[in-house]
Structures are given as structure tokens and as C-alpha cells.
Image (cartoon, rainbow, N blue to C red):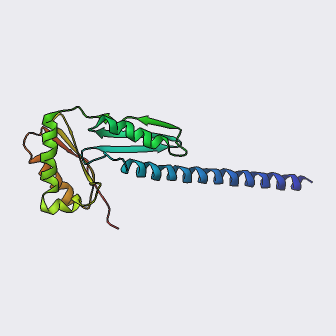
Amino acid sequence: MKSKSVFVIVIVLLLLTAAALAQDRDQARSQERITREVRHELLMLPYFGVFDSIAYKVDGSTVTLLGQVVRPSLKSDAENAVKHIEGVEKVDNQIEILPPSPMDDGLRIRLYRAIYDYAPLEKYSLGVQKPIRIIVKNGRVTLEGVVDNEADKNLANVRANSVPGIFSVTNNLQVVPSK
């Protein structure tokens, strides 16, 4: 009789463990799906350009939006696009709107030409979404995004530093590991 009780308890514990593992797996799949959909929705924003940088974090059903944008409407567009995704219950929009500045606008154009019109970096100008993001705030430049190798990362940094009128350049470019 005693061994029968122990057997039943072990079976119940195994079933509970299996149910908990299945629930964790379902939550992980749901979070992966939300992450994919958030990425897709953000990339599809019509005014998301090379001078904007939007990042995100997915924590369960909460999505946190980060980054900097030139157009104020892009901040609200990003939030609206993400909050309608199935499974998203809360959006924490921490996107910074860059201050309007004719000086910064001029720097953006000169930086774009210095980086994307330079022959060794021209390959990054192909496609709709440019992989090197140029963020300019009060004469300070931040390069965000991805490049193929360390040489391209350093070259983009040198080209950005060669533009007159810049106070500083922060190079946050990431090198994509080759497959």
C-alpha cells in the first residue's frame, strides 16, 4: 500500500513538472514571436531612416522601445505599431526625439556622404534599411548598427571623424560574426 502511494506521488510530480516545462516552452515561443513581430513592425515604419535608431527589449508581454529619432511622429508611430501586436500588453516608449537643429541637419548630410559615398563602404548603401545609423545630437555623432568586419567599423569611424564641425564621434557599430 505504501509503495502504491509513493508511486502515485512520483507520477503526479512528473506530470506537474512536464506541465511546467510545457508552459515555459510556450512562453519562450510566444516571446520569440513577439520579438520577431516587433522587429518587423519597426522596420516597416515609413519614415524610419538612416538618421534614426530604434532598439527594443521584450520582457514577457512588455516591450520597451529605446533609441533616438529625428521626427517626433516616428516615436508615436513606433509605439502604435508595437502595441497592436498580439501578446503585447504594455509598451514603455523611451525613444528620444532629437532636438531640431540646422547645424545637425547639415552634419547629417555631410556624414551620410562621407560614409555611404566612400567606395569601400558603398556596399552598405544598398537596400532600403541602411545598416549604419548616423545619430547626430548637438554636434555629437553616434554610429549605430552593423558592419561585416572590424576594418569597415574602423573605416566608418575615420570617415565620420573627417567631417568638419563634429565635436565627437562614438562608434557603437557591431561586427556581424561571419558564418
Left or right of residue 83: residue 108: left
- Nearest the viewer among 18 and 103 is 103
Give the percent coordinates (x, y) of residue 10: 78, 54
- How many labels sit on residues? 0
Q: Report the quarter where the C terminus lies.
A: bottom left
Side (left or right) of 112 relative to 7: left
Name the residue furthest front: 46
Residue drawn 13% across the image and 42% down it = 107
The answer to whether residue 65 is seen in the rendering is no
Q: Is residue 74 visible?
A: yes
- In the image, residue 25 sits, relative to residue 78, either above or below, namely below
Q: Quadrant of the N terminus?
A: bottom right
Work out which residue is located at the far bottom of the displayed protein and give it. 179
Q: Quadrant of residue 164?
A: top left
Q: Is residue 10 left or right of residue 35?
A: right
> Residue at horizontal 47%, vertical 44%?
58
Residue 66, image x, y percentages: 36, 39
Front one among 144 and 88: 88
In the rendered image, residue 95, in percent from the top left (x then y), is placed at: 35, 36
| Picture residue at 21% right of the left edge, 55% below the top | 153
Farthest residue toward the left? 164
Residue 127: % across, % down: 27, 59
User: Is 15 on the left-hand or right-hand side of 139?
Assistant: right
Nearer-the-camera pick, 179 or 100: 100
Q: Residue at x 29, y 54 (%)?
A: 129
Quadrant of the rendered structure where residue 80 is? Answer: top left
